[in-house]
Image (tube, rainbow, N blue to C red):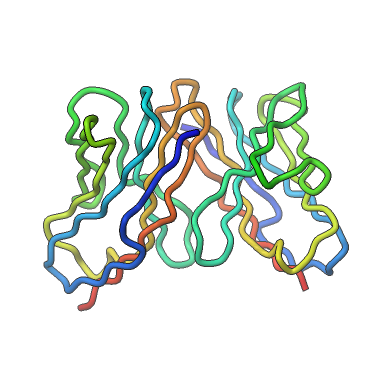
């Protein structure tokens, strides 16, 4: 069965620092990959997704992610975080159904 | 895109009772799912709601506890039966495009069992 691993449970950064959140999945077939964000008290929002083509995908709010098939990874990046990026970030993999990683809580200090 | 209406948005229920959550989608979709998000945790797939047949449950979830109906391609219900405080959670309805390139989520139902 497919599974999704997010390496960091809680990340604390200062504003303007660079961000990289790790995500690995275990399924060997063709999958679609997603990153979602959940701001405090709000519902899930799609940041970006990958299903084919250029493995470097750009999403909203300056986020991007790189799909590395050989590493089964789909890491999320942002060059310079803002206080408003404080939220929970979920990596998800879809094959048939959608499975979520445990989530990474990002706290950005002003 | 798909717009999902989920209700109730929140409820406080007594232990031992049952609550039925409704999910209405504005377009016909093949794939519809129910998730649970416990406090401070990620989303866990409860089951896939199949139109015209019994839902497909994930490990740890059973039909007696979480009966699901899906009478047509735009509507589904999830019932949380014989509730206990451990069932306090957010329950989310989700649909996916046929190509699985996007998923849409309802606003969720925040359930508190006292």
Left or right of A60: which side holds B73? right
Q: Where A45 sits versus B50, above or below?
A: below
**Rendered image quadrant of residue A85:** bottom left
Residue A28 placement (x, y as % from top left): 36, 27
**Rendered image quadrant of residue A107:** bottom left
Q: Quadrant of the C terminus of chain A?
A: bottom left
Q: Which residue extends farthest bottom?
A: A110
| Residue drawn at (76%, 23%) of the image | B53
| Residue drawn at (31%, 60%) of the image | A8
Left or right of A9: which side holds B71? right
Left or right of B106: which side holds B66? right
Residue B68 placement (x, y as % from top left): 76, 38
| Residue drawn at (50%, 66%) of the image | B40
Residue A53 placement (x, y as % from top left): 21, 23
Q: Which residue extends farthest right?
A: B16
Q: Where A30 sits versus A59, above or below?
A: above
Q: Where A42 sits versus B106, above or below?
A: below
Give the number of callouts.
0
| Residue drawn at (45%, 52%) of the image | A44
Q: Where B102 sits versus A62, above or below?
A: above
């Amino acid at each position: 069965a497919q599974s999704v691993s997010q390496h960091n449970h809680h990340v604390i950064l200062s504003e303007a620092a660079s961000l990289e959140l790790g995500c690995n999945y275990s399924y060997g077939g063709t999958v679609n990959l997603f990153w979602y964000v959940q701001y405090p008290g709000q519902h899930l929002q799609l940041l970006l997704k990958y299903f084919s083509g250029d493995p470097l995908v750009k999403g909203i709010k300056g986020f991007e992610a790189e799909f590395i098939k050989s590493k089964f990874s789909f890491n999320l990046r942002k060059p310079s975080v803002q206080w408003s990026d404080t939220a929970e970030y979920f990596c998800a993999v879809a094959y048939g159904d959608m499975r979520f990683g445990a989530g990474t809580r990002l706290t950005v200090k002003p | 895109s798909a717009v999902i209406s989920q209700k109730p948005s929140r409820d406080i229920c007594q232990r031992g009772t049952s609550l039925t959550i409704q999910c209405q989608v504005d377009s016909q979709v093949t794939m519809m799912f129910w998730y649970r998000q416990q406090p401070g945790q990620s989303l866990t797939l409860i089951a896939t709601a199949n139109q015209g047949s019994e839902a497909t449950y994930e490990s740890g979830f059973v039909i007696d506890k979480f009966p699901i109906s899906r009478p047509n391609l735009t509507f589904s219900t999830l019932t949380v039966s014989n509730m206990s405080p451990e069932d306090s959670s957010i329950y989310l309805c989700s649909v996916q495009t046929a190509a699985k390139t996007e998923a849409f989520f309802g606003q969720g139902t925040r359930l508190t069992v006292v």
